[in-house]
Amino acid sequence: ALTYLKELLAKNPTDFRALTLRGKIYKGILLDDLAVSDFEAALRHGATASSVKPDLIECRRRAQVGRDRQSTVLRGQSGRSSEGTASK
């Protein structure tokens, strides 16, 4: 399905139905940043807010949670590496 939608959007990048469907597929496979991009584009090109907004909000939230977790892990790793070098 993603291959078909990619081909369809290559021919018509403003097809809000295809953007919405691809966004829903990305959401389903937890590619939230890609889903957000497609949902936002779908809204710009004519999708109704009621058909896209709930998914967009959920994907934005999940993407932010993922970024927050990654940031926390990176801060923890940098703290450990500086502790290791301080004891040498």
Image (cartoon, helix red, strand yellow):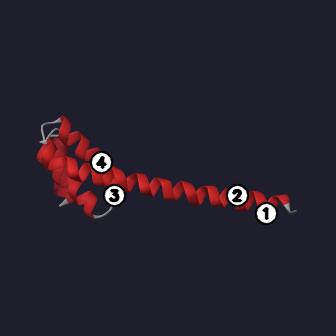
The residue wearing badge 1 is: 84
Where residue 36 is drawn, which disc sits there? 4
Where residue 79 is drawn, which disc sits there? 2
Identity, as a three-letter code, of the amino acid under mark 4: Val
Q: Residue at x 71, y 62 (%)?
A: 80
Who comes first in sequence, dot 1 or dot 2? 2
Where does residue 65 sit, x and y in percent of width and height?
43, 56
Q: In this image, 73 relative to 50: left or right?
A: right
Q: Residues within 10 Å of mark 1 (few under 14, many from 20)?
A: few
Count numbered badges in the picture.
4
Q: Residue at x 11, y 47 (%)?
A: 17
Who comes first in sequence, dot 4 or dot 2? 4
Q: Quadrant of residue 47?
A: top left
Who comes first in sequence, dot 3 or dot 1? 3
Q: Image height check: is 31 above or below 38?
A: below
SS for callout 4:
helix
Q: Quadrant of residue 81?
A: bottom right
Q: In this image, 32 relative to 21: left or right?
A: right
Pick out the residue farthest to the right. 88
Q: CA distance from mark 4 to mark 3?
A: 9 Å
The residue wearing badge 3 is: 31
Who comes first in sequence, dot 2 or dot 3? 3
Q: CA distance from mark 4 to mark 1?
A: 39 Å
